[in-house]
Image (spheres, grey):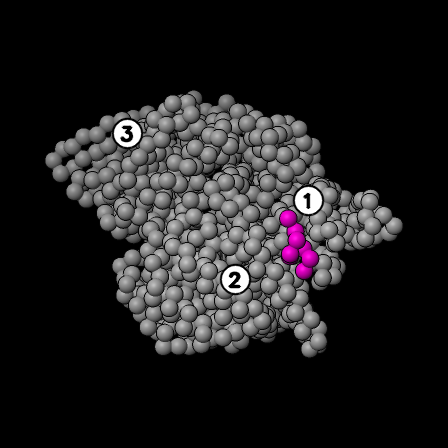
């Protein structure tokens, strides 16, 4: 059944109090739920209450201590007849957490019990109105064997504990009314790193990061990140924490990154555990970002939640923006911006131009888990960022202040957010609301003409058709621009133009010569820019633009223009030589620029990804893109060998630390190795093996091993084996071992993946392990797009095998196959064939079925 946004109606009942009693056991947990319900004065009255269930067996049911007036099962839901104004309903269910391989609801992981309820997991624990607009106050008592579950955690504050014999129990009370998706419970043998934080209002908050025994030394960074998040949210958004306790628990079997349950965040171990020997710089950043993200949800998500799941971007888009701004303030802001744009372009843009395109506020769905997408999260963040850009930081803050004040304690809508910003920041967002309803990445075409002293800029926009949305209206697109004097190398000030019609013209006076246009600076709008810009202007911008993002962009545009032309139509030898010459010249400027820090230099050295290149072409041939990209890498490596070598040697001198200079040095080193692997493989193997052997940190070690994994060398075999032996037993590092091989440039990567699937350490039961092998593989174009279709078959086999175990994770592997319309006809047919094979399977989950049928279109 399809659920539609326009069909929203308020729930006829309020659940004022929820009391839960858990008798815990790994194989059998008994749940007694006592719900105090009364009629919702703001909804149409109903003679029944619908309590959602999912695979639950009803043990007993009573109303006001006696038999209910009536009840029936409607599918998985329990529908109870209620005659009066207020009632107490008691429900007993029993579940088997050890059999819960979906990892939704209450499940067992490594001998502990934990929960994941967003979006609709609570209904796998007990019958309940499992929708985000039903807010209730929870009191939870949990009881279980003390030896097995020494630690008992839930939302809010611990109000009572006690023991009887082998059993013990704890009672928790959460004073903040919340929807069921924010409920959490953890029981297990855990140890904690404890610290504290004093809020701006003087509240002393106890902080704990719970992990398994042995992992404690790897929690320091997570704790520091948490304290920084709490401070930052006070300073930048004026948000203060509202309980005396904040707990984080790390779990190794987890479908997503982490979850913002009130006062009890549950995390994938990947976003908690780190030390220099086992975590890369990227891992450290990921932890800081995700800890911030979940903490920030306490206000943008928990204090103000969503009315219905169509409003998901209300909490996710806003919280992603908040975590992006936080990470930017903690590290290098320009580099963080570039990384965020890279994710948007490599994941969200393809989504927006394919069969699964949807607006940031979708209109319909079958399975909500399929809408935790890059569009809702990352484009959602960009849309709010545009409001911030148009308002300016200060006025934007007035807008968010008004939003928090006005909607605190409510289940709100995206519309509530936009009208708060509109009023608080003093913006007119009438037309801007189209960003919430129209899917598709707008294309902006820019033309610059010069005559006399006048530069005339013509901008036009086109929002492409997407499934279900053939015609689009023009949207307001805020573009930061600057016009450079090509001789002076400077501009006379950045301007913000908001293109809000199909076409518009802007005039700028006082230009002796035709200026060089820098547009969409800081990536002020999530659009693609089309312009006919001479290559020499891009070379100019790559060397001179004072906006680091625009400088990166010029570098990317230079390479993308060439690679798309070469892989698309083919180039004359002379054209190729000129293009590569220009790119090499621009890259040389980057390598020797003393004003650049290495972290930024490392960004500028990156070649555009193969997915991004494919996205630039109407129909892509992955093999040609791959070979052109490798060829450019080889050419640049050859022509810039001495500059790169010098950089590498300089970078090698810096001792390990987490400061930006040392991180930059590590980034540059691995970039240099990547180029060397293409231009001088023997030398690259030697350097990489040396780097691996000397490495005193995971960033250097993984970078070196990544390069080795793409080569056919004795060093490859030896270092892969060393890595495995060195880190055996550390699941997160063994994940890297799988991923490095699955994403390698080795010609036999596909055979390696097939063999790794048979490795004793591989299992379909652990989502991190599944992703480390198969997501890495699906994102490795030269392997996934093998000409005979073997890569597609392997992913389809995986989907079919995983679907009965963990449908939510299985469905995440469909989008790579769904790209078929944009791939050359031979491969497209093979991809389609695999989608059809999946569709023909008799027992597909709702998750996978929805994704496959939308992908076939
Ligand atoms: N709200 C979580 C976050 O953004 C994600 C949870 C998603 N869970 C799911 N089953 N789809 O951090
Ligand atoms: Zn989130």
Q: Which residue is mark 3?
A: 158
Residue 269: image location, x then y, percent: 34, 49
Mark 1 → mark 3, Cα distance in angstroms: 51 Å
Asked whether 69 falls inside the magenta stretch, the response is no
Which quarter of the rendering shows the C terminus? bottom right
- Assess disc 1: are there few (<14), some (14-19) or many (≥20) residues with their C-alpha within 10 Å of its C-alpha: some
Could you tell me residue 408's position as x and y percent?
A: 49, 26
Position in image of residue 41 (x %, y %):
50, 22
Cβ at disc 2 under 8 Å from ligand 1: no
Q: Secondary structure at mark 1?
A: strand
Residues rendered magenta in the picture: 539-546
Q: Secondary structure at mark 2?
A: helix
User: For this view, does 652 lie left or right of residue 558?
Assistant: left
User: Where residue 480 is drawn, which disc sits there?
Assistant: 1
Q: Main secondary structure of the magenta part?
A: helix
Left or right: where 658 falls relative to 520: left
Q: Splitting the image into 4 quarters, where does residue 221 fall? A: top left
Task: Name the residue located 72 percent from the left edge and 62 percent from the top edge.
Answer: 536
Question: Do callouts 3 and 2 mark residues in contact (Cβ within 8 Å)?
Answer: no
- Comparing 668 with 705, the one in front is 668
């Amino acid at each position: 059944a399809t659920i539609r946004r326009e069909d929203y109606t308020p729930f006829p009942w309020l659940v004022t109090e929820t009391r839960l009693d858990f008798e815990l056991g790994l194989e059998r947990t008994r749940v007694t739920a006592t719900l105090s319900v009364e009629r919702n004065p703001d909804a149409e009255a109903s003679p029944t209450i619908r309590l959602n269930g999912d695979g639950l067996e009803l043990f007993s049911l009573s109303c006001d201590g006696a038999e209910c007036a009536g009840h029936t099962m409607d599918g998985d839901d329990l529908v109870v007849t209620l005659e009066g104004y207020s009632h107490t309903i008691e429900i007993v269910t029993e579940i088997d957490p050890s059999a819960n391989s979906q990892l939704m609801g209450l499940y067992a992981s490594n001998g502990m019990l934990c929960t994941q309820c967003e979006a609709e997991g609570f209904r796998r624990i007990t019958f309940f109105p499992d929708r985000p607009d039903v807010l209730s106050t929870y009191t939870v008592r949990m009881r279980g064997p003390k030896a097995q579950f020494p630690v008992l955690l839930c939302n809010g504050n611990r109000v009572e504990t006690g023991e009887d014999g082998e059993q013990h129990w704890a009672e928790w009370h959460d004073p903040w009314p919340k929807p069921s998706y924010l409920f959490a419970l953890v029981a297990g043998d855990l140890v904690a790193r404890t610290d504290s934080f004093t809020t701006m209002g003087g509240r002393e908050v106890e902080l704990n990061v719970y992990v398994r025994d042995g992992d404690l030394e790897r929690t320091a960074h997570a704790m520091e990140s948490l304290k920084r998040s709490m401070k930052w949210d006070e300073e930048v958004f004026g948000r203060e924490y509202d309980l005396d306790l904040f707990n984080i628990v790390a779990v190794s079997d987890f479908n997503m990154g982490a979850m913002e349950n009130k006062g009890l965040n549950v995390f994938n171990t990947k976003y908690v555990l780190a030390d220099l020997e086992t975590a890369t710089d990227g891992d450290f950043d990921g932890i800081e970002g995700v800890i911030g993200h979940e903490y920030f949800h306490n206000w943008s998500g928990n204090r103000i939640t969503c009315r219905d799941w169509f409003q998901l971007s209300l909490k996710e888009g806003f919280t992603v923006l908040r975590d992006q701004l936080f990470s930017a303030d903690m590290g290098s802001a320009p580099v963080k911006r570039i990384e965020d744009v890279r994710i948007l372009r490599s994941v969200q843009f393809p989504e927006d131009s394919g069969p699964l395109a949807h607006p940031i506020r979708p209109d319909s769905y079958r399975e909500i888990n399929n809408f935790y997408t890059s569009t809702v999260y990352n484009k959602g963040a960009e849309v709010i960022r545009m409001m911030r850009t148009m308002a300016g930081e200060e006025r934007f803050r007035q807008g968010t202040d008004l939003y928090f004040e006005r909607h605190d304690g409510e289940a709100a809508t995206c519309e509530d957010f936009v009208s708060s910003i509109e009023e608080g920041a003093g913006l007119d967002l009438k037309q801007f609301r189209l960003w919430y309803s129209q899917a598709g990445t707008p294309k902006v075409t820019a033309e610059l003409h010069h005559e006399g002293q006048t530069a005339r800029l013509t901008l036009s926009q086109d929002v492409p058709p997407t499934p279900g949305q053939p015609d689009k209206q023009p949207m307001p697109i805020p573009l930061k621009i600057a016009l450079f004097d090509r001789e002076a190398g400077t501009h006379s000030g950045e301007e913000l133009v908001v293109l809000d019609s199909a076409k518009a013209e802007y005039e700028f006076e006082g230009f002796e010569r035709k200026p060089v246009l820098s547009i969409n600076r800081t990536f002020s709008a999530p659009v693609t820019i089309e312009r006919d810009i001479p290559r020499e202007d891009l070379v100019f911008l790559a060397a001179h633009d004072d906006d680091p993002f625009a400088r990166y962009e010029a570098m990317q545009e230079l390479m993308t223009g060439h690679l798309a032309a070469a892989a698309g139509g083919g180039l004359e030898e002379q054209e190729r030589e000129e293009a590569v010459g220009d790119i090499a010249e621009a890259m040389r400027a980057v390598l020797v620029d003393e004003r650049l820090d290495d972290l930024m230099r490392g960004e500028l050295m990156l070649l555009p990804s193969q997915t991004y290149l494919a996205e630039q072409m109407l129909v892509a041939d992955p093999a040609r893109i791959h070979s052109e990209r490798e060829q450019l890498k080889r050419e640049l490596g050859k022509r810039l060998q001495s500059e790169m070598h010098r950089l590498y040697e300089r970078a090698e001198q810096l001792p390990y630390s987490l400061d930006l200079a040392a991180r930059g040095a590590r980034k540059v080193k691995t970039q240099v190795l990547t180029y060397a692997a293409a231009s001088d493989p023997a030398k690259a193997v030697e350097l990489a093996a040396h780097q691996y052997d000397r490495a005193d940190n995971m960033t250097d070690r993984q970078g070196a091993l990544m390069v080795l994994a793409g080569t056919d060398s004795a060093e490859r075999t030896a270092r892969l084996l060393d890595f495995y032996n060195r880190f055996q037993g550390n699941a997160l590092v063994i994940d890297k071992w799988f991923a490095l091989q699955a994403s390698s440039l080795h010609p036999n990567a596909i055979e390696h993946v097939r063999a790794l699937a048979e490795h004793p350490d591989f299992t379909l039961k652990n989502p991190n392990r599944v992703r480390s092998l198969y997501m890495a593989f699906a994102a490795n174009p030269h392997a996934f797009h093998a000409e005979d279709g073997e890569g597609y078959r392997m992913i389809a086999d995986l989907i079919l095998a995983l679907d009965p175990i963990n449908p939510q994770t299985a469905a995440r592997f469909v989008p790579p196959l769904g790209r078929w319309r944009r791939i050359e006809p031979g491969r497209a047919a093979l991809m389609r064939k695999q989608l059809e094979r999946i569709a023909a399977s008799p027992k597909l989950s709702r998750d996978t079925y929805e994704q496959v049928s939308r992908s076939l279109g």
